[in-house]
Amino acid sequence: MTAQFSDTFHYHGNDFDVAGVNGNELFYPSGFGIIPKSNCTACWKGFIATYGILDEMLVLDELDINIDNLPKKFLWFKRAPKINGHKPVNTPDDGPGTFFEYHFENVALKINFTGGILIGRDFIQELYVHMGFHPAWKYLEVYELLFEKGKLVKENNVSGRMKEFRDKLKNAEEAGHEPEKIEHIYAWVEKCFDLSYNF
């Protein structure tokens, strides 16, 4: 397995990783007739969404994606999909990197999301695991953002709770607890929040 690229979130002038979501679906390309495809094992879903807050509303700000159902070359300009009236700013030949062929920017698409999103930054490199998505407790700075129909209604700084969880886990491992007991500590983190965050 390979560690997966996280979606990102522009917040308070910083870039955060999306480390947990609880609620209805965020952005998915199929709603715009776009079928994403994976070009690398680090992004099986085939795209990375970048979210932000605009006028207190959750929006899709940018999108990097590989598109499976889009003709290349000469037909591309006529058939390129639009998201909130925006076409990709590049063609497959001048994509922003080896992983994604298309880049949408300044999309400002409102997301009618109700639920919670955990965002984290300052990832702790010693906790890196080469598999899946990294959970919120592996970041030094973590916020829980709560939304009602896309509107940001509450922000909780939960960095202290994440540190508490890391400390409990470290103490259990240093004490040589059996894996079953350590699993109880993992379950404890779910009690730290009003919402649970599962992938």
Image (cartoon, rainbow, N blue to C red):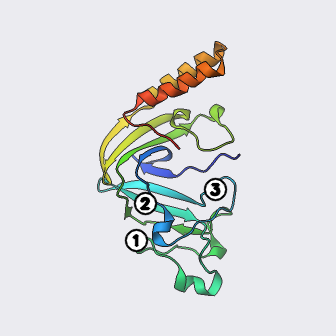
Which type of secondary structure does the marked residue at label 1 adopt? loop
Residue that label 1 marks: 84
Query: Counting residues from the N terminus, which is met first, the one under dot 1 or under dot 3?
Result: 3
For the residue marked with disc 2, what is the amino acid?
Answer: Leu
> Horizontal and vertical percent for residue 49?
50, 58
Residue reaching furthest to the front: 180
Residue at 56% from the left image edge and 69% from the top image edge: 35
The mark closer to the camera, 2 or 3, is: 3
Residue 101 x, y percent position in the rendering: 62, 69
Amino acid type, label 3? Trp
Numbered label attached to residue 21: none
**x 39%, y 64%: residue:** 109
Give the mark nearer the N terminus: 2 vs 3. Answer: 3
Residue that mark 3 sits on:
44
Q: In the depicted view, which residue is nearer to us: 183 or 46?
A: 183
Residue 133: name its quadrant: top right
Q: Which residue is mark 2?
A: 60
Q: Are marks 2 and 3 in contact (CB under 8 Å)?
A: no
Q: Position of residue 6 (x, y in %)?
A: 56, 49
Query: Do the residues bearing badges 1 and 2 touch, measured as CB atoms within 8 Å?
Result: yes
User: Residue 79: x and y, percent?
Assistant: 53, 83
- The residue at 39%/34% (across/down) is 157
Instruction: Tell me the amino acid under the disc marked 1.
Output: Asn
Mark 3 neighbour density, 10 Å: few (under 14) some (14–19) many (20 or more): some
